[in-house]
């Protein structure tokens, strides 16, 4: 128990770790709130709790949007360090990664403009900018899925160069990445304009479920990454 608390505190001390915890609580609240408000047999107090949880989830989502106002430079630094992926052995991975970085880099200013428009800081309509940011997010997720699948294919071909345990660990992380990105992509499609696939058809609890799955996978991956770093020291 004490070790779990220490691990949580270490996670909350970093910006990325805190964001992942907030994201998990955000979608978890939407999941529970959506279930409570959806069930017509629940009593009035449970229904009110569900509404409160949905409002709480919306506030946490807004909090994350505001915090992302400061992510542009770190994303730019990462994109610059990767460049055109000259150090990448596989050409397919190289260009998938470059396109992913482009989509991620463009995502932030689009979301910032949409946020500023909603906050009435600038005189533009936010709808199209939210759409642009959602499309870019979805493109990034789709590219991430393709990249993970490509990595899995290469691992199967070149499996002899790594130990079985290391190869299994790497493959498991890529499978988790596919699961996480697929869950997020399903929500991204839901937030597209009506008429596009299942856009607008997800109830609150299903959006919360997909987001919770993705968020928990992110926490697992972050914890696994920390353990790997500790083992290498």
Image (cartoon, rainbow, N blue to C red):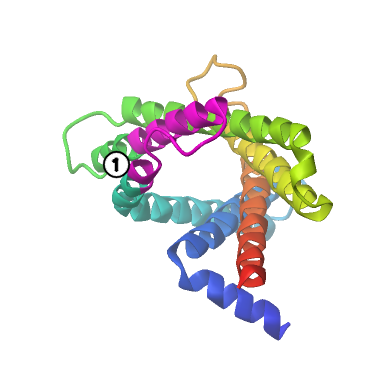
Q: Quadrant of residue 112?
A: top left
Query: What residue is at 65 percent from the left and 30 percent from the top?
Result: 150
Work out whether residue 204 or residue 199 is closer to the camera in this orientation and state it.
199
Q: At 75% from the left edge and 47% from the top edge, which residue is drawn?
A: 172
Residue 226: say if magenta.
no
92 up-or-down from 74: above or below:
above
Q: In this view, does 51 lie to the left or right of 74?
A: right
User: Mark 1 sits on what residue?
Assistant: 112
Quarter occupied by the N terminus:
bottom right
Residue 87 part of the magenta-drawn span: yes
How many numbered discs? 1
Percent across and percent down for residue 9 are 55, 77
- The percent position of residue 216, horizontal first and vertical second, equals 66, 54
Is 83 displayed left or right of 113 in the figure? right
Residue range in magenta is 78-107
Q: Which residue lies furthest to the top in this view?
A: 195
In the image shown, does 93 or 70 lie closer to the viewer?
Answer: 93
| Quadrant housing the C terminus | bottom right
Quarter of the image for residue 228 reads bottom right
Prevailing secondary structure class for the magenta stretch in the rendered image = helix
Task: Tell me if residue 162 can be seen.
Answer: yes
Query: Could you tell me which residue is drawn at 51 percent across and 36 percent down?
Result: 88
């Amino acid at each position: 128990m004490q070790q779990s608390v220490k691990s949580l505190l270490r996670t909350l001390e970093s910006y990325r770790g805190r964001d992942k915890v907030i994201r998990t609580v955000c979608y978890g609240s939407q999941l529970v709130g959506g279930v409570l408000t959806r069930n017509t047999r629940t009593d009035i107090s449970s229904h009110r709790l569900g509404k409160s949880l949905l409002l709480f989830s919306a506030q946490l989502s807004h909090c994350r949007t505001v915090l992302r106002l400061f992510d542009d430079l770190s994303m730019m630094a990462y994109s610059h360090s990767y460049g055109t992926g000259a150090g990448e052995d596989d050409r397919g991975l190289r260009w998938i990664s470059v396109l992913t970085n482009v989509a991620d880099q463009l995502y932030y200013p689009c979301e910032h403009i949409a946020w500023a428009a909603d906050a009435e800081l600038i005189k533009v309509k936010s709808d199209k900018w939210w759409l642009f940011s959602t499309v870019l997010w979805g493109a990034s997720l789709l590219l991430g899925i393709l990249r993970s699948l490509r990595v899995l294919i290469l691992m199967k071909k070149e499996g002899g160069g790594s130990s079985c345990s290391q190869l299994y660990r790497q493959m498991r992380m890529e499978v988790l990445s596919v699961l996480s990105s697929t869950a997020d992509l399903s929500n991204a499609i839901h937030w597209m304009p009506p008429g596009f696939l299942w856009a607008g058809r997800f109830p609150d609890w299903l959006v919360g479920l997909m987001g919770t799955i993705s968020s928990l996978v992110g926490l697992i991956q972050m914890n696994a990454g920390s353990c790997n770093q500790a083992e290498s020291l």
